Image: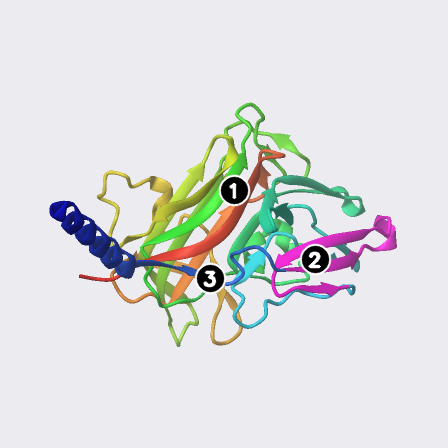
Amino acid sequence: MRKTLIVLVLFAIGNGMWAQERWTEPIPYGDMDQWQVRYIHESKLLGGKVKTLYALAPTDTIRENQAYIPAEGNPWGCSATYARFMGIETGMEASVEPERRGYGYCCKMQNVLTHVNIGDIYAMVSGTIYTGQALEPLGIAAKSRPYTATEFGVPFTKEPVALMLDYKANISAEKPIISTEKNKPDTIGGHDCAVIYIYLQHRWEDKETGKIYARRVGTAYERICETIPEWINNHEIPIRYGFIKESEDFQAYEDLNQVDMMARNSRGKMVRIEEVGWSLDNPTHIVMYISSSNAGVFRACEGNTLWVDNLRFVYEKEE
């Protein structure tokens, strides 16, 4: 009996030490329970409909056609955006929206094929949330050069060991990828997956040229390529630090400069972020990207859907 008590005490102490060495920290608005709703009044030439756009943000309702600017402390941008070109206004709705889950909400992201009558413009929009900001109102340049209208990443100096979240997915194994790069929908085949990735970067600016450079400090990447009908709770995606190209699980899509990322320099100009190497420097910025598609700009399998909830970072105490 005495030995049993000693073992139980040691087990309890061990569990207590583990609890102290490993903990989670919520990501702002990552519980998906706060949303800003915008009612964008489409131009009469497009039919005059009211488009409903959602953003992860302090709860609010906006009834005017105005650009979304994240409040201080809110890291999130999304693909549900307000656009204006040639004096015509519209909204890219439906790709990101809240959905009831229990007593709160989760975030639903879906690939949606949209059509604007003026100019007969088509766009395949992937449901996406990311750390950063879309520079609204989006103009016609956003169709031909989409990343020039998106600022990627926000300041971040911590070093979590993993991203933890709840998720489920509806991923078609049969439907092809559709591209609207040439405007008209074009079936190009292939298999589309949902994607979640994190880049921790150490950034700096060349004061003479205004160019922004970065070294990759941490990398987390996961593709979801099949339907997950039931919620998987407390799922962890590890963040790997430093030079990871020689690790057995390294994938080519995790390499440097695989995504065209832009940021605003000290002169207020949008410039490309050039990743120039790997390092163990302290991070200065985080790029987190969660999407219902990984097929590329204006490419996706229509209808693929990803749901996420309860985003938080996992930390461990160093020995």
Q: Which residue is mark 1?
A: 296
Q: How is the image coloured?
A: rainbow
Q: Nearer the viewer, residue 141 or 224?
A: 224
Q: How many marks?
A: 3
236 on left or right of 180? left
Residue type at mark 1? Gly
- On whether residue 141 falls in the magenta region, the answer is no
* Magenta residue span: 35-62
Query: Residue 5, how many percent across, how many down?
Result: 17, 49
Query: Residue 2, how many percent across, how many down?
Result: 12, 48
Residue beneath the point at 51% across and 64% down: 75
Q: Which residue is mark 2?
A: 82
Residue beneath the point at 29% across and 41% down: 250
User: Which labelled disc corresponds to residue 153?
Assistant: 3
Does dot 1 land on a helix, a strand or a loop?
loop
Q: Nearer the viewer, residue 87 or 79?
A: 79
> Which of the marked residues, 2 or 3, is nearer the chain's N terminus?
2
